[in-house]
Amino acid sequence: MLHPAVLLPFLLVSLIWGSTWWVITGQIGGVPASWSVSWRFLLATPMMFAVALATGRSLKLGRAGHGLAFLVGVTQFCGNYNFVYRAELHLTSGIVAVMLALLLVPNAILARLLLKQPITARFALGSLVAIGGIALLLLHEARAAPVQGKVFLGVAFALIAMLSASISNVIQADRTGQRLPMVSLLAWAMLYGTICDLAVAWTTAGPPIIPTRPAYWLGTGYLAIFGSVITFPLYYGLIRQLGPGKAAYNGVAVVVIAMLISTALEGYRWTPLTVAGAVLATIGLIVALSARRPAT
């Protein structure tokens, strides 16, 4: 973990992804969420193909590879992000980040069902503690919500986003995914996901809505370049070096950064309930992660 080739990508991904939660809040005011997601990946996709070509990776995936890329694109770059953006209409960015950090729970369940990977008692205990912490944070949000029911709608969107990302994480861990160059797989997955994003946006929000605010496009560029093109290859590189358990500590660091940014820029107010919830969620995540089998 302390080797520069591991530590620097780990810190960079944590910092960028921790900040993207707040940047997304500037993408959903006055612009339908689905069109904001579409603009982000319309910009990111050609750059990811360019990265693949620049690094000498073959873009040939084969039929099975394209099938996997399509499933990853639909779940990760369409389903996950469309529901994340919608969740942030009703919850603070820090809370959404905390909920998405619980990705380990559906990951473990789906990995057990699809990949036959065991779930340890330590992992189950840590997950229960983390869920208890999340429940306290959401209880605070429900009490503070100015409009009835909107918090629970945001929770539902965040849960669907988490499930979509989990499906993507698990299915790309099969034999087909392991033999494909990660950057090439991500490029094709982004392309398929972008096509899906455009279809969803046109169906749910009508013809394209093109914002004119410079700040909007600066945010979109940041999310496309830093939050997508740079971080996804780095993160999956960490998974290949450390294994999924140690690499997943990234999620805890992302939550800390996202909550601090939400406090500074969104006016998030800490109470004894939210402090207890954040502490429980962090302890639970660390306990759960420490139970994961190390990379070999």
Image: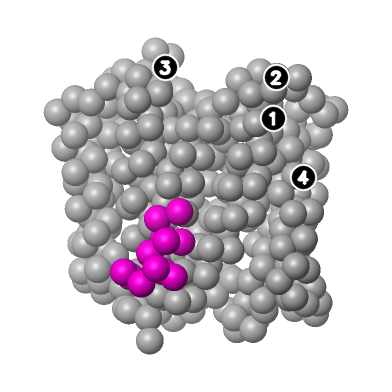
Decide which of tag 3 and tag 2 comes sooner along the chain. Answer: 3
On screen, residue 205 above or below 242: above
Residue annotated with mark 2: 213
Foreground tag (4 vs 3): 4
Is residue 88 in sight in this rendering? yes
Mark 2 and 1 residues: CB-CB less than 8 Å, in contact? yes
Tag 2 secondary structure? loop
- Residue under numbered circle 3: 148
Q: Residue furthest front?
A: 4
At a point 73% along the width and 75% down the height, the residue shown is 57
Q: Earlier in the sequence, mark 1 or mark 3?
A: 3
- The nearer-to-camera label among 3 and 2 is 2
Answer few, some or many: residues within 10 Å of disc 3's Cα (few below 14, many 20 plus, some between 14 and 19).
few
In terms of sequence position, does the residue under pointer 4 or pointer 2 come before the other?
4
The magenta segment is 1-12
Asked if residue 108 can be seen in this view, the reply is: no
Contact, mark 4 vs mark 2 (Cβ under 8 Å): no
Q: Position of residue 111 (x, y in %)?
A: 45, 72
Q: Compare marks 4 and 3 and give the one earlier in the sequence.
A: 4
